[in-house]
Image (tube, rainbow, N blue to C red):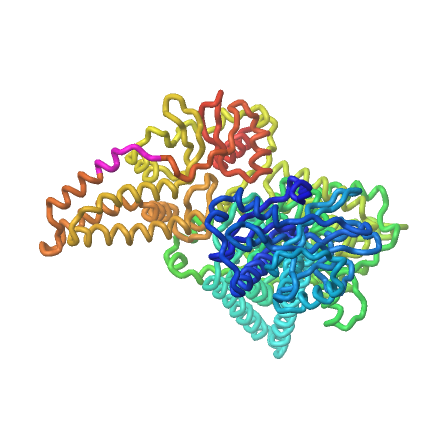
Amino acid sequence: MSSRSHRPDAEVEDFETFDDRTPVYAYEQTLGYGNYSSVALKQFAKDTAARLNSKGKQPASDQHDADPASWDASRNRAGSTASNSGGGGGLAVAALFAPQDASGSGAAGVASSSSSGGRRADDALEMPLDPLNPDASVALDLHSSASGPLVRHGDPVPGTEVHTEEIDLRGDGSSADGGARSNKAADDLRALTTPQGIKAQLSYWVAAVFNNDWVFLALLGMLTSTIGFTVDLTIAQAEAGHRQLVHLTDDKFLQYLLWVSVTMGVMLFAVGFTHFVSTNAIGSGIPELKTILKGIDLYHYFSFRTLVAKIVGVAGAIGSGIQLGKEGPYVHIACILVHKGSKHLFKAIANNKARRLEMLSAACAVGVAVNFGVPIGGVLFAIEVTATYFAIRNYWRGFFVATVSALMNRVLVTWYTGSGVITPLYQTFFPKTSYQPIELLVFIPLGMLGGLIGSLFVKCHRKYIDFRRLKLNNISWIKNNWFMYPLIVTFVLATVTSGVVIGPYMNLTQRQVINNLFSQEPLVKVNPDWDYPNIFVALLIFAFVKFFFVIFAISLPVPAGMAFPVYVLGAALGRFVGEVIAVINPNPVEGWIPASYALVGATSCAAGVTHTIAIAIITFELTGQIHHVIPLLTAVVVSNAVAQSWMLSFYESVIQIKKLPFLPDLRKGRLYNMTAADLMNRDLALVSEESTYADIKDLVSKTEFSTFPVVNSREAMILIGTIRRDVLQRMLNEQLSKALAGLGGRSRSHTLDGAVSDDEHHGDTFSSITSNVSFTGNETLPTDSTLPENERKKKLRKRRMPSFVNIFRKSVENVDAPVEAQPDEREKNALERRIHSLLDEQVVLRGARIDASPFQLVARTSLAKVHSLFSLLGLNVAIVTSRGRVVGVITMRELNAAIEGASAKP
């Protein structure tokens, strides 16, 4: 009985020709590792076929090559069935069939593998080709004196026999019984120790390793932690050296000059390095990642140059003494490592878009975990910040890689410091009864204050960016010198952080500030710098200056985050409230600790800016205590409620500033009453079966859409599919190239060369533009372009200019050229007539690359459902139909405009 009748339906047969003379039938059972294990087996088949041919085997007949049925017949005649003896299971890896001669008889033979001890067949399926495992005996002999079969079967059904097929690779037509061969084990071992056998085993194990999520995530966590530790160490050494240099003199003015000079020098180095290496490294990176996780690729965001610029830039920017955050850059670094690792090593991840996005989501948790050493808070923060919908199956990936990265980071820090103990980053020692129930009446208003401060911060940042674009960038000496703005801002920030102008507490590092504010001891006793002129004034001045300091600092063109600086700002406000309460109630029985208010203030301010609850969990892990669970969560919930009712989160605000394609949440109740018909674009640009090439010319020259609906006719409007802009452009170029076919050499030298060069330029431009993206999937310039809006649009139109326009332009330009360079007038007129004739021809859509299954929406689909579908599926465009007829198109631009327009109305 042939094993073909026992294969499960999921198995697939692949008929390929590995050799010019010997067709080989290959069936692979990849055991859950994609196609990687089959690559080595296919190569093994090629080597075996070549060996047989070199030993005088006759090539396969054309009959077998041309007639698969004849080939199957010869293969089935040659195949034999073997049963598992003793309850053993055979290891099914692949079956290789090669005909012996033109008659189809004597196909390659096989031997079946068996196991002893009653091992189940499905257990044997999981065993690799291991010569040291006696239960997995698979003959792979490549020598001419012994048969070298590979045995195959489908997934075994419990309680039934497992059938295999035997193949004779010796070529003598014999099919030896495995039990009759006394030297079978020796042959198997000898076959596996040959170079081909070793190569097959190594390929199998390498494929297994580089297709394993656990291995990939573990390497990601360790590598990101190592990079983060190196950056942290560089920053610490730079700050220490900076302060040592300043304290070489006791003169205050010289200290100020040294501080400002070093700060400006290091910061300008970071700005220049980022500017020349990769401007995509500027900023946090989280807003762009939110867009990418929606399924949209951004131009060069994950390049190696961006990785280098991100690492060096963040180390230089923070090492200069300017107080910035690292959480965003670390998230970006981890995501770049995911992209590069999946592209070059773990290729199965890169080939699966959904799987790659899952790994990018896990990388967000790595960045936060490495920065703060908080695995739980890192995962929750990544989910809240980057994902609208989160698959629960990704939970284990996030927690696993966050745990590995946080543990690795803390171990490296412990090893470097020599403390021998792993502790939280900002460990506190609050008593168990650290607050009274009545204090909740203070914690709730403090949470409201944090939400207001967070929303005000986002609002002021956005206003300042608009002011900078409209006013500052129009000043000639700033507009023409890219380093002038960083130079001025760095000078101002360096003056503030020098501690000479405002107060010595401004010269403290962020770590020192947090340790002081979270301390249970009186603040003046912890650090006398805060008593200038007194503790209350110092805290208020620090919080006020810090608010605007962070806004100016994150506007610098360097890699930087803002979450932790805002966290420090909130801690100062909270400590101020705590110190005021300490004055009102100087002798509390229990609770009323000023540091607990600093804890709540820091968490509520950060939550108001980021719109996340995970900040509370991060605070628990940062401090190592959970005594303030109720106060922290209460303040965070109140802060989020206040902040979300007033402003977007900081990351969503940056997305709007950079005009990245992203859908905001549905916040207004009136949005749920809208339908797809209310927001769709009814001005359709489409292709029909009746369209001419002139219509195609108008589409690609007068519109900016990247995808066009294809209908049967403009009267019926029945949807056939969609076609991409580049496909239409290619069809148009091919049609117009026919106009040059019959021209003379001289005329062609003036038209063809220009057209070809412009074609090549246009193709390159289109490729680079479409790698970036806009709300409609249209062509845009890179979002970080510094060109004014009108110049950017002109440049875009120039880049998008089709080749047929360039043909006419070249002909017109030649009229003004010297007489000896002009083409013949008759040939030019003939060319123009030929072009018009070709444009009037009907478009041939047969064979064109048309997407026959575009995403469609019914006109009465609710806006809430449209929003959910675009968010879940990562859609950029959807065709709206009514009773099968195309009535409109919805893109991310229309959807975003509808949501923002409704939200803006009172």
Quadrant of residue 389 in the image?
top right
**Quarter that holds the C terminus:** top right
Q: How many marks?
A: 0
- Residue 151 location in percent, x, y? 67, 53
Is 489 or 53 nearer to us in this picture? Answer: 53
- Res. 369 in view: no
Query: Does 841 appear in magenta?
Result: yes
Taking the view exactly as shown, the residue that stands out farthest to the bottom is: 248
Up the image or down, 195 lies above or below 129; here it is below
Residue 886 left/right relative to 513? left
Q: Nearer the viewer, residue 193 or 711?
A: 193
Question: Residue at 19% of width from left, 51% of height from top?
Answer: 748
Camera-nearest residue between 411 and 42: 42
Which residue is most to the right?
589
Can residue 407 be seen here?
Answer: yes
Tell me residue 159's x, y (percent): 80, 42
- Say left or right for 898 vs 149: left
Q: Quadrant of residue 168?
A: bottom right
Q: Looking at the picture, how far across and down is residue 347, in whole percent?
A: 58, 55
Whether 207 is among the magenta residues is no
Does 139 sit above or below residue 243?
above
Q: Residue furthest left?
A: 819
Whether residue 550 sits left or right of residue 278 in the image: it is right
Q: Residue at x 58, y 51 (%)?
A: 26
Residue 802 place in picture, x, y as percent: 31, 44
Give the side of residue 693 with respect to residue 421, left or right. left
Seen at 82% across and 51% down, the residue is 86
Write down the region rendered in magenta.
836-844
User: 413 above or below 175?
Assistant: below
Q: Quadrant of the N terminus?
A: top right
Residue located 55% across and 62% down the image: 52
